[in-house]
Image: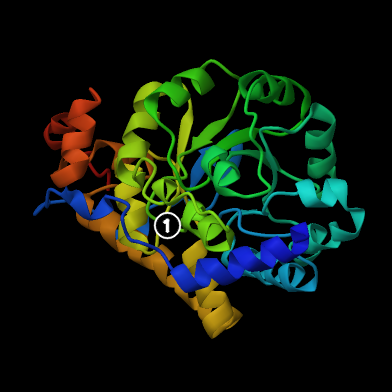
Amino acid sequence: MSRAERKIDHIHYALSTGQSRGTGLNEIQFVHRSLPGSSVNQISLSTEIGGLQWSSPIFVNAMTGGGGEATENINRQLAELAAVCDIPMAVGSQMSAIRHPEERSTFSAARKANPNGLLFANIGSEATVGEALAVCDMIEADALQIHLNVIQELAMPEGDRDFQGAVERIDAICSRVPVPVIVKETGFGIGREAAELLNDLPVAAIDTGGFGGTNFAAIENERAEKPMAFFNGWGIRTAASIVETAAGAPGKRVVASGGLQHAEDVVKSIALGASAAGMSGFLLNILLMDGLEALIEFVEQIKKDIRMMMCALGAKTIGDLHQVPLIIHGETHHWLRARGCEPDRFAMRRPPSFDS
């Protein structure tokens, strides 16, 4: 099977298997403020990652490319969404375009559709410095994502089996590319130990890519003659991964992703320690099922809902959300306590004072 055919397979299986909603975010509950002293009109959704100013904390996270005309159309429409809604967008892994130049248009279509927006290139941790520079140049990238996908590769019949030297390659890429670097997981979560390693590197941010969204192990196992079913439930749930990443890399911005579907997921993720939130599979489903206009309406509604929730919490800025008190319960609480992440401290935080 060609790489392009595999990309189409990924889309098909992602839509058919859906998202598990196993992110752990349902185990997060905000402490209500009866006197928030807030005003919707004074709330700012802006955030900053790697020196780049975003008008909103949400963005279109990496999905696809390298699958011929079908993925070119998807990336073009997602870029149109990003342009209309004024949010950043990341393309999928561009390694296919490095190896097969005819696939470059499936990625460059995003820049053509959104010439002035924030667009992120994407490559795996196996990449060389030269390949990283090439993918950035390919789409005139404003940032570079380096994705970590050990479990997907192991579950993939034709996947990689050697993951040595990734930290050193990431370090080398960070020192050479002219744009900020975001290191991201692909659905299995960043743990505290990995975050500690990344905290020592010149990366701009760490994207949790937690368990609970599109399950690439399950997708690859659908394709495999001898599936590795033990990987289907493997990973750190998104809610726990956000806290672990923030604890392990206090010097880095945290980006939340992994099964986020609506404004409540976004606000909870930021309150747990993230500064931005990526959405992917759920957006793709809306695009392919209901069309671009419906997706634009959905994203605009998410931004409105975030403002409403921030108003209720008395949070004027994205940074203020890091101070609001919340309760962590259930499996997420047990996980974080066992991992030494002190989940009870979130309940005792002092809420921000809304300066009116």
**Figure quadrant of residue 273:** top left
Query: At label 1, which amino acid type do we have?
Result: Gly
**Figure quadrant of residue 307:** bottom left
* Vertical arrangement, residue 78 with respect to residue 271, above or below: below
Residue positioned 29% across, 50% down in the render: 268
The image position of residue 212, as x and y in percent, is: 37, 54
Most extreme residue toward the top is 200
The image position of residue 153, as x and y in percent, is: 60, 43
- Residue sitting nearer the eye, 37 or 143: 143
- Residue sitting nearer the eye, 213 or 216: 216
Residue positioned 58% across, 78% down in the render: 288
Residue positioned 83% across, 51% down in the render: 97
* Vertical arrangement, residue 47 with respect to residue 285, above or below: above
The image position of residue 211, as x and y in percent, is: 39, 48
- Residue sitting nearer the eye, 117 or 182: 182
* Vertical arrangement, residue 322 with respect to residue 308, above or below: above
Can residue 190 be seen from the camera position used here?
yes
Can residue 300 be seen from the camera position used here?
no
Judge the density around disc 1: few (<14), some (14-19), many (≥20) Cα neighbours within 10 Å.
Answer: many
Most extreme residue toward the front is 226
Residue behind mark 1: 213
* Vertical arrangement, residue 52 with respect to residue 226, above or below: above
Image side of residue 302 versus residue 53, left or right = left
- Residue sitting nearer the eye, 106 or 203: 106
Which secondary structure lies at badge 1?
loop
The image position of residue 58, as x and y in percent, is: 48, 55
Count the labels in the image.
Answer: 1
- The color scheme shown is rainbow
Image side of residue 220 versus residue 327, left or right = right
**Figure quadrant of residue 331:** top left
Most extreme residue toward the right is 101
